[in-house]
Amino acid sequence: MTIKKVDVLLVGAGVMSATLGKLLMQLDPSLTIMMVERLSRVGNESSHVLNNAGTGHAGYCELNYTPQLADGRVDISRALAINAAYEASLQFWSYLVGTGVLPAPEKFINPIYHQSFVWGADNVAFLRKRYEALHAHHLFEEMEYSEDHEVLKRWMPLVMQNRDARQAVAATQVKHGTDVDFGALTRKLVRAMTKNSAFDLELSHTVTSMKQYPDGRWHVRIRDNHSGRSKTIDAGFVFLGAGGGALPLLQKSGIPEAMGYGGFPVSGQWLICKNPQVVKQHTSKVYGRAPMGAPPMSVPHLDARIIDGRQALLFGPFASITSKFLKEGSVLDLFSSLKSGNLKPMLAVARDNLDLTRYLITEALRSHKDRVAGLREFYADAREEDWELASAGQRVQIIKGCEVKGGRLEFGTEIVSSKDGTLATLLGASPGASISVQAMLAVIERCFKSRLQSAEWQQKLKTMIPSYGESLDENEELLHVTREKTRATLKLRQA
């Protein structure tokens, strides 16, 4: 039996694994790193351009990051945290572009306005409060707000086209938003790593078993999907960066920290415009407010995207119910994830979220006419024949044990790692890829603690991510300095 020994094994060739691999390679180029992917292409599941929101989530336009509290106040704490985290991603990408590791930035990131749009008196009042709370903070000081139809016609002409002049509407706008092709970014990060002889990439290979030996190292068995031959990887550290597929892999590991975790899979679909005359009229990302009870990934948005260098226009995503954990997964994924340790939380969540389940079933049964009717709330003149349906990605929301209810459903992301720091994974979805750098820094802080304490690693991290170890939420001057540099390097300045 073939055994290959490596320092780091990355399972899954998505943006998380690619980011962690590149960070570690920059910190220590001598580390032997292997990446294993069950598909035949890098970045083709959750990181793929149509399987990912692509927004560069920064909290500018995503209203679900700023919930309204029972007393009427708008909680902006999560938006501040996500915005600061995204700035860390921009800094790392800026460093890689500046040093020639990544190619021209427009190959994976482009500037685009981020806008929120609502209608109805209650929603207008909410957006006004949200703006007032965010605009007062230096992270969001460039945000604009208007309830004036004429102003909004200039901001988002397609959305305001033939809209009732008496309708109460409001919008916010941030001009330094971004559109990111995370699939392209992932492939470019991996391509850069392949230039190092200490890096190996194994595509079309599936992990079949995992076992930790007394010396702390992991023996991970992988099978070639084409030949059926297997081999074992002897790894000092394992990262499970497999998107929705991370939970089953975590369960394979058998670490105590995996106990009690379950997953609630949600799929989605886009309406994609096939009329170029319509596409060219909309050049921003416009996010609305999600219906009551809808999961975060179904926040409706009319979304201008750059896909393979060409402008595209998407609307959605429309959430749907599924039992798959991956787009190219199995309908048995959900059922095979049921274990004695997570059965109680899973059943409790199923019991307490019947409204969500009904919502997802209803969404799945919507006709093309119904979906276009939803689009017309954003674009009144939308014609059914101009739009076609396409699948979006799969997301697996976290289910955890809860003393009060038995289990609870969470819509964020969470890092789970073994006590000895030899294995880690990222569970959950939103905001996902946008905070990949901060998330993977957290993995390094947990699992490479002793090496991270060295002056060499600290200095390298500060060079790559100038805000590392400091708070952009609190340090206004540092934000302005780093933001100015990243905008210039990544060519995100608006004309």
Image: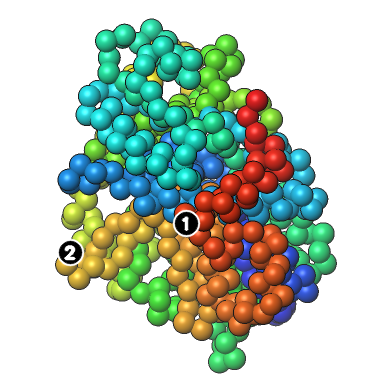
Q: Which of the numbered marks, if any, corresponds to residue 9?
A: none
Please state which amino acid type lies under the numbered disc 2. Answer: Lys
Residue 474, which numbered label? 1
In screen coordinates, is 392 left or right of 117?
right
Which of the two discs, 1 and 2, sits closer to the camera? 1
Which of the two residues, 27 or 493, is positioned nearer the viewer here?
A: 493
Judge from the rendering whether residue 21 lies leftward or rightward of residue 427; answer left or right.
right
Q: Position of residue 331 (x, y in %)?
A: 41, 51
Which quadrant would the N terminus be assigned to in this image? Answer: bottom right
Identity, as a three-letter code, of the amino acid under mark 1: Glu
Ranked by sequence position, the earlier of labels 1 and 2 is 2
* Residue found 48% across the figure and 20% down from its top: 155
Q: Please indicate, yes or no, whether residue 184 appears anywhere in the rendered image.
A: no
Using a 10 Å C-alpha cutoff, classify the residue at mark 2 as few (fewer than 14 neighbours), some (14 to 19) or many (20 or more). few
Q: Quadrant of residue 376?
A: top left
Residue 215 on image: x %, y %: 59, 91
**Residue 192 location in percent, x, y?**
77, 55
Local SS, label 1: loop
